[in-house]
């Protein structure tokens, strides 16, 4: 059976909705129309003795006449050169051919309306989506790294409506659609594809391509379209980190080095490897989270807080908890903490979700 999903073209915007393709609907209705046509031809031909051909001296109706009569009848043209002459043929026309004619017209008109309505809906939906697209997250690549990044974003408070996936692979795009994400099919190294994803209005861009050269070019294009979006890029080789940073990435993660270090630590100390894997996974055990400083915590030492503070963010600079600069916490600080996984990662502190912050 033909695939009911819409054909995906490069650069096209795909919304998270599985709907029958208008072209599949057109083909299906065309087959229905041909079926009605064939049934009517058979009906007329079987009862051909009840029809008279006024243009034939013998008045006989053959198969070609049955086809001709059917087409002009179902299309409501009705030239009148072939007409039912017997009482049985008239009854058949009234009870069978007329409903078939109505069904034939409904199929044709319905097809046109469905195609136009479907295209109109998609155009309206795309326009409405572009108008409300702002401060979203663009994720380039829907492979293993891209999916994990999106899962982390969703667990951290983002919604699927806030995320736009860019991927050149049609199957990956369909999988992202099935997972509820809006997808732009295309190569992220092309600026027109990034424009369709609304990179110029994005607050964050996550790049997880399979090739480091594509990552560099994507970062350059992102920076040309949006100089303020926080851009995170994953690279395969550590030697390419300086190049990606020079291209404009705010943060660069070396996937091979990170995996290799985790494997090495697990070999040296299985317990340490297990703890690190626990910190990187979501939903059980321990979580690493960033939260705001609370009013009662101003002036205290990081080590004295209920949360296990491992770093303090002050003036966009990350300080380790033992750094003398952050011996006393100040208004505007943000904390990197380790906490139980069951707590919301953006909640002020474990077990509470509404304490006032210094900014309040």
Image: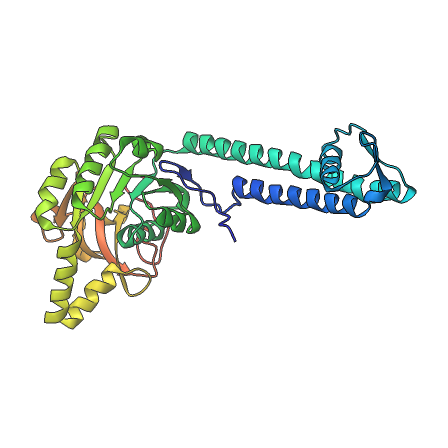
Residue at the (28%, 65%) spot, across then down: 285
| Relative horizontal placement of residue 86, taking residue 270 as reference (left or right) | right
Residue 174 picture location, percent across and down: 40, 48
Q: Residue furthest front?
A: 57
Nearer to me, 4 or 222: 4
Residue 182 picture location, percent across and down: 40, 42
Q: In which quarter of the view is residue 256 placed?
A: bottom left
Position of the C terminus by quadrant: top left
What coloring was used for the rendering? Answer: rainbow
Q: How many marks?
A: 0
Q: Can residue 30 be seen? A: yes
| Relative horizontal placement of residue 94, taking residue 201 as reference (left or right) | right
Residue at the (50%, 50%) spot, across then down: 2
- Reply above or below: 349 against 127: below
- Reply above or below: 197 against 298: above
Nearer to me, 75 or 176: 75
Residue 193 picture location, percent across and down: 31, 34
Q: Can residue 250 be seen? A: no
Residue 54 picture location, percent across and down: 83, 30
| Relative horizontal placement of residue 4, taking residue 220 as reference (left or right) | right
Q: In which quarter of the view is residue 277 placed?
A: bottom left
Residue at the (19%, 37%) spot, across then down: 217
Nearer to me, 71 or 353: 71
């Amino acid at each position: 059976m033909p695939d009911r999903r819409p054909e995906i073209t490069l650069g096209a915007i795909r919304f998270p909705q599985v709907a029958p393709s208008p072209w599949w609907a057109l083909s299906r209705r065309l087959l229905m129309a041909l079926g009605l046509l064939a049934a009517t031809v058979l009906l007329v031909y079987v009862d051909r003795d009840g029809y008279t051909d006024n243009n034939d001296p013998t008045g006989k109706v053959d198969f070609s006449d049955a086809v001709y009569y059917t087409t002009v009848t179902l299309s409501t043209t009705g030239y009148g050169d072939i007409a039912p002459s017997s009482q049985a043929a008239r009854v058949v026309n009234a009870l069978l051919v007329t409903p078939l004619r109505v069904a034939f017209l409904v199929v044709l008109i319905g097809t046109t309306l469905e195609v136009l309505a479907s295209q109109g809906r998609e155009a309206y939906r795309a326009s409405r989506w572009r108008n409300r697209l702002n401060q979203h997250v663009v994720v380039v690549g829907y492979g293993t790294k891209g999916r994990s990044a999106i899962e982390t974003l969703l667990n951290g408070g983002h919604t699927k409506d806030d995320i736009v996936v860019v991927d050149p692979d049609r199957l990956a795009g369909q999988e992202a659609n099935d997972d509820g994400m809006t997808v732009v099919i295309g190569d992220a190294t092309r600026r027109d594809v990034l424009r369709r994803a609304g990179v110029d209005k994005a607050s964050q861009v996550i790049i997880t391509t399979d090739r480091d050269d594509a990552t560099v070019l994507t970062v350059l294009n992102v920076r040309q379209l949006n100089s303020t979006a926080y851009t995170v890029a994953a690279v395969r080789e550590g030697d390419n980190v300086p190049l990606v940073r020079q291209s404009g990435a705010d943060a660069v993660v070396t996937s091979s080095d990170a995996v290799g270090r985790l494997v090495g630590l697990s070999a040296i100390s299985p317990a340490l490897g297990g703890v690190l894997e626990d910190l990187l996974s979501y939903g059980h055990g321990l979580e690493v989270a960033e939260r705001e400083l609370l009013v009662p915590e101003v002036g205290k030492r990081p080590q004295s807080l209920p949360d296990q503070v491992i770093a303090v963010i002050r003036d966009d600079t990350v300080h380790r908890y033992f750094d003398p600069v952050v011996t006393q916490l100040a208004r505007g600080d943000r904390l990197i903490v380790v906490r139980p996984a069951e707590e919301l990662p953006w909640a002020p502190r474990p077990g509470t979700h509404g304490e006032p912050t210094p900014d309040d």
